[in-house]
Amino acid sequence: MYRFAVAQLFCIAAAVALFYFRLWKNYGPEAVSTDFFIYLLQKNLLFPVIKTSLLYVFPPSLFLYIITATGKEKATRIYCFTLTACANFLFIILFLNLADRAVAGGNIAVPYFTTVSDNIKQDNAGRQVAPETDNSSGDRKSGIIQDSSISEDNKKISGEGTDTGAGTAVSTQTVSISEIQPETPDINEDGIPGKITPGMPASGQTQQETKKHEKKPKTLPRDRTFFGRNYVPASKDIIEPPAKKKNIILIFMESMEQTFSEGKLCGANLIPFLSETASDNITFSNYTDGYATNWTQAALVAATSGLPSSYLTAKADRKKDVNSAAEEIDDWLNGVYTLGEILEDNGYARLFVQGGSLAFSGAKNYLEAHGFRDCAFGADELKEYRKKRTSWGIADRDIYPVFEDKLSKISKKQPFFAVLTTIDTHHYNVPKDTPKVFDMRSKDVIYNADSMMKDFLNRFYLQNYSKDTVLIIVGDHLRMAGGPKSGSGFLKEIPKEQRRIYNAFINSSRDELPLNLQRTFTQIDLFPTILEAAGFNIKGHRLGLGTSVFSEEKTLAEQYGQDELKKKLRRNSPLYGALWE
């Protein structure tokens, strides 16, 4: 029996040694300590490992070892010894997998790390501040994040002095709650968001609801992974607004592809008007799905924060898909400075309209936390259209008039930022009134979506505000090519690497610049691209993981290639997890 105990202890020691080696390689020497392992145990982050080992690994190992020790036939002993070794090897793999998920997956352990990131700091609002850049060399200077905590007694934020490791200490700083609380939008009788006193709730909103959306300072871990080296947090320090601010209308067309214009691939040009619009304005050639950005909510998050949603895929399991996992998140990317907040701070009124329910996939929680509180409308808010809902929500033929009506109100307060997401072209969805043109109903839906966009743009050009408005039309992701019943069977015959997402930039502030239209980019690159299309100047042309395609800087997809980039982004990152937690 003592031999079994020795063998199991050896396996445990090997697993722990490999785990510490992985910590040292990915997170730095400060993670390699007995204290950190004790911390994991205290927080029950390794409980799944211990439970699984006790229930499923050690008992069969013990059983096999007994047979090995008592077996009379040599072949039996060798067979059972091999199985015992395999069971122990399985334990090591299981330990590393579950430990990795405990540290940088669903249950993040990064509050343990008190050392600061050497390329990120925070302002008084708890938002991350980008590193300073030397204009002559482009090299980053060290940035600092304070280790702050909230005192319940005096309701103040106190920052502890932190040694940066370079001989510089961060001095203690005290900031009141009212200073870190963001300004809260209110709604007037025209449905236009406005400003009210900082620290006070909007009308009809409780103190508890207001507190839910406070930006709280957080300690972010040192991160030497690919994500940590390439992430550029948005901040006022690196974003310069234009002298004259343009309105921005952003339309996400569900599953809309540039591929649909290619008659050789689809049998006919299914989007003749959108094709003409793209050719008459600015369109970039190679816009496609990125890693963990290939569904609607993930595309929205990527386009407004520059971040993929692999955190949601990590939280999902066999009983819970990514949309259900997203609905359980209350505090979306707290502390991340997103597109909605950037434009809010620059005096933009905001509007978000979609035909689907905002509760689906956690869209409402994300929008309210990032610049669209009290100005986002979905199927549940638009109750007068309840009887006209399809299986996916209010049909596009009804949602366009709603959007235009709210645009007419919000346009009284310029500049404004308005977002519309469509749903008709979602796979498996065919509105009853869709005219029949082709032999496949899915093609009819795509063709009809093109016709509705034509009608919308014709009305848009008649509006007084159109000349001062940047209109951006993009597909949110590639259409999902399901089975015959999905209505997307024709896409299965087209290699995915040949398919591209639709994009068109109308009345962009960068129209007169010499542009390279042959760009490879994904949804994360839309974040800085949208701002630069509206005339904002971004130091370095990068925000989040995204790169503006209006610049000459290469996107990550161009630098590494799509396949290699996805491999790099799959690696655990303590900083990425901390941004979500």
Image: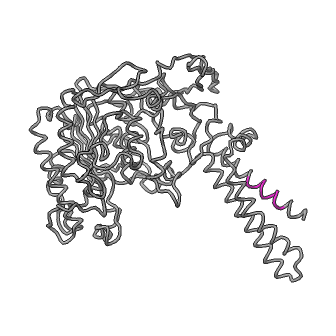
Q: Is residue 431 magenta?
A: no
Find residue 206 and report its horizontal and vertical position in percent: 43, 28
Tell me which residue sits at (48%, 43%) in the image: 329
Q: Which residues are magenta?
A: 7-15
Q: How many marks?
A: 0
Residue 8 covered by magenta stretch = yes
Q: Position of residue 308 (x, y in %)?
A: 44, 47
Q: Can you say which quadrant of the picture contains the N terminus?
A: bottom right
Q: Is residue 306 above or below residue 18?
A: above
Residue that extends furthest to the left in the rendered view of this protein: 462
Q: Work out which quarter of the rendered image holds the C terminus and state it.
A: top right
Q: Percent x, y for residue 234?
A: 42, 32
**Residue 339: quadrant of the picture:** top left
Is residue 516 shown to the viewer in this render?
Answer: no
User: In the image, 446: left or right of 30?
Assistant: left
Which one is in front, 496 or 189? Answer: 189
Residue 8 seen from this side = yes
Prevailing secondary structure of the magenta residues: helix
Horizontal relation, residue 301 to residue 318: left or right: left
Front residue (pair 556, 483): 483
**Front residue of this view, candidates 334 and 477:** 334
* Residue lying at 19% horizontally and 32% vertically, measured from the top left: 409
Q: Residue at x 63, y 48 (%)?
A: 102
Residue shown at the point (47%, 40%) measured from the top left: 330
Q: How is the image coloured?
A: one colour
Left or right of 518, for residue 17: right
**Residue 462 at what x, y percent from top left?**
9, 38
